[in-house]
């Protein structure tokens, strides 16, 4: 077995006796981790207790796996993710997604805090991701391919499931939570983008920008998972307003929309 597959399998095998096979995986972005408390009959496992699992040292990422029930589904929620900008390789940054895949997750919901490029987006807007632009300079599938994970050249025509986007729209209507749709641009980070970079991203069709999600989506599709992405627009991107960007603002806005965000996620899961 390849080293990568071995390491992922070791983590999955360690988790299996503690968690009944989850159907849905959720990655909770900056400031959004409280959703995990909505899971019933939940077991919480700190990342440090899972073999080979990378820790996240970013403020707003709790660093724990919570598995429980919601809407009649068994759900595995990652409260915090490892980021490429922390110095992890792409394969390490997407390790958790691989483990979820081996545990049997078929539906993956990715969330993040993002900067708004689309001028109609206000802080607190929840944006369903229709597509992404990967500008991180690399890809998590670079290197030898292990066919046990997926094919050498996975198709990305529908990276974000049309069916799940329709489910999200139906859930939004039912709960009264407004959602927008748009394209997410993923950049390396950790510095925020310059105003010139934001003008460039707007020109090429991006509506929001962040430093995660795209690699996770690529790996999930490589393993034939169905993906839904939702960005919480926490701030206007650089140059939209004449004020500097600070992470505290990201956390404050994410906290402000926590109730709406949780209601939307619960309604989505109930409709899967």
Image: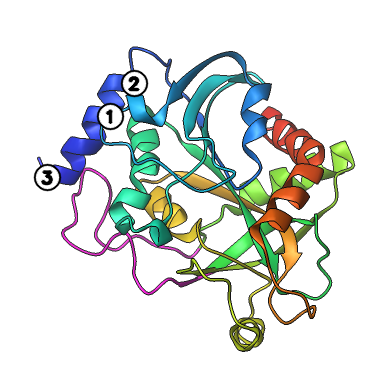
Cα distance between the residues tagged 1 and 3: 15 Å
Q: Which mark is residue 11?
A: 1
Which residue in the protein does label 3 denote?
A: 2
Question: What's the residue at 51%, 22% (across, down)?
Answer: 67
Mark with earlier residue (2, 3):
3
**Among the two numbered marks 1 and 3 on one chain, the one whose residue lies closer to the N terminus:** 3
Answer left or right for 64 relative to 254. Answer: left
Callout 3: few (<14), some (14-19), or many (20+) C-alpha neighbours within 10 Å? few
* Element under disc 3: loop
Is residue 159 placed above or below 121 in the rendered structure?
A: above
Residue 221 is inside the magenta segment: no
- Please provide the residue range marked out in magenta: 133-157
Secondary element at image label 2: helix
| Residue 97 in the figure: left or right of residue 180 | left
Q: Nearer the viewer, residue 78 or 230?
A: 78
> What is the spatial separation of the Cα atoms under label 2 and label 3, in whole angstroms?
20 Å
Q: SS of the residue at dot 1? A: helix
Which residue is at a point 63% across and 62% down the rendered structure image?
A: 130
Tag 1–tag 2 contact (CB < 8 Å): yes
Q: In the drawing, does residue 179 fall left or right of residue 245?
A: right
Residue 243 placement (x, y as % from top left): 77, 75
């Amino acid at each position: 077995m390849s080293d990568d597959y071995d390491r992922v399998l070791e983590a999955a095998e360690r988790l299996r006796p503690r968690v009944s096979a989850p159907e849905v995986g959720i990655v909770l972005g900056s400031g959004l981790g409280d959703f995990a408390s909505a899971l019933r009959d939940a077991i919480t496992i700190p990342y440090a207790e899972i073999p080979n699992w990378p820790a996240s040292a970013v403020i707003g990422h709790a660093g724990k796996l919570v598995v429980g029930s919601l809407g009649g589904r068994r759900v595995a929620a990652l409260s915090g993710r490892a980021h490429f900008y922390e110095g992890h390789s792409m394969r390490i940054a997407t390790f958790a997604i691989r483990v979820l895949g081996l545990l049997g997750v078929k539906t993956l919901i990715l969330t993040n805090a993002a900067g708004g490029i689309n001028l109609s987006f206000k802080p607190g807007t929840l944006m369903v991701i229709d597509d992404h632009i990967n500008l991180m300079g690399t890809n998590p599938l670079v290197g030898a391919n292990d066919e046990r994970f997926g094919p050498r050249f996975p198709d990305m025509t529908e990276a974000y499931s049309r069916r799940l986007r329709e489910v999200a729209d139906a859930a939004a209507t039912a709960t009264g939570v407004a959602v927008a749709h748009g394209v997410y641009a993923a950049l390396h980070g950790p510095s925020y983008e310059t105003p010139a970079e934001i003008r460039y991203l707007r020109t090429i069709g991006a509506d929001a920008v962040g430093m995660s999600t795209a690699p996770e989506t690529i790996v999930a599709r490589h393993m034939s998972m169905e993906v839904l992405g939702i960005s919480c627009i926490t701030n206007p991107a650089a140059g939209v307003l004449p004020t500097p960007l600070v992470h505290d603002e990201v956390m404050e806005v994410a906290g402000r929309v926590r109730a709406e965000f949780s209601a939307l996620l619960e309604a989505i899961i109930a409709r899967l």
